[in-house]
Structure formats: C-alpha cells, structure tokens
C-alpha cells in the first residue's frame, strides 16, 4: 500500500511545474522592477538634458 502511494506521489508533478513557472515569473517581475527603479533617475536626467538642449 505504501509503495503504491509513493509511486502515485512521484508521478504527480503537474502542480510543481505550475509553481515553478509562477516563481520564475515573480522573479522576473522583481528584477524588472529593480532595474526600472535603479535606471529611472538617470534616464529621466538624460531626457531632461535633451529637452533643455532642444529648447531655445
């Protein structure tokens, strides 16, 4: 009986795959948020410099 339960639990990996994809998406979102936050100020400064240069 325990052997059948062990085999049944080993063959069920659909939920684990879904959780792994969810974790990857969350990690990508966190990395994107950190990158936008870190680069936001410098990109804003660059655009401001261009705007000041183009304004007569």
Image (cartoon, rainbow, N blue to C red):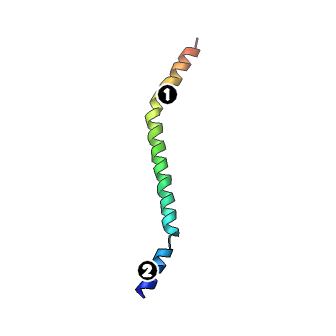
Quarter of the rendering containing residue 55: top right
Q: Nearer the viewer, mark 2 or mark 1?
A: 2
Between discs 2 and 1, the one toward the N terminus: 2
User: Is 12 situated above or below 31?
Assistant: below
- The total number of labels drawn is 2
Quarter of the image where the C terminus is located: top right
Name the residue: 48% across, 54% down: 24
Spatial distance from mark 2 to mark 1, Cα to Cα? 57 Å
User: Is 2 situated above or below 50?
Assistant: below
Name the residue: 53% across, 16% down: 52
Quarter of the image where the N terminus is located: bottom left
The answer to which of 11 and 44 lies nearer the viewer is 11
Q: How far from the left and from the top, in percent, is residue 20?
A: 48, 60
Q: Residues within 10 Å of mark 1 (few under 14, many from 20)?
A: few
Judged from this view, the residue extending furthest toward the bottom is 1
Name the residue: 46% across, 44% down: 31
The answer to which of 56 and 3 lies nearer the viewer is 3
Residue 6 badge: 2
Q: How far from the left and from the top, in percent, is residue 42?
A: 46, 28
Q: Residues within 10 Å of mark 2 (few under 14, many from 20)?
A: few
The answer to which of 13 and 35 lies nearer the viewer is 13
Judged from this view, the residue extending furthest toward the left is 2
The answer to which of 48 and 15 lies nearer the viewer is 15
**Residue wearing tag 1:** 44
Q: How far from the left and from the top, in percent, is residue 40?
A: 47, 33
Q: Secondary structure at mark 2?
A: helix
Q: Secondary structure at mark 1?
A: helix
Judged from this view, the residue extending furthest toward the top is 56
Name the residue: 55% across, 19% down: 50
Q: How far from the left and from the top, in percent, is residue 48?
A: 51, 22
């Amino acid at each position: 009986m325990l052997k059948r339960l062990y085999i049944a639990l080993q063959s069920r990996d659909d939920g684990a795959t879904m959780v792994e994809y969810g974790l990857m998406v969350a990690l990508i979102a966190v990395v994107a948020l950190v990158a936008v936050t870190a680069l936001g100020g410098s990109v804003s400064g660059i655009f401001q410099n261009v705007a000041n240069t183009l304004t007569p």
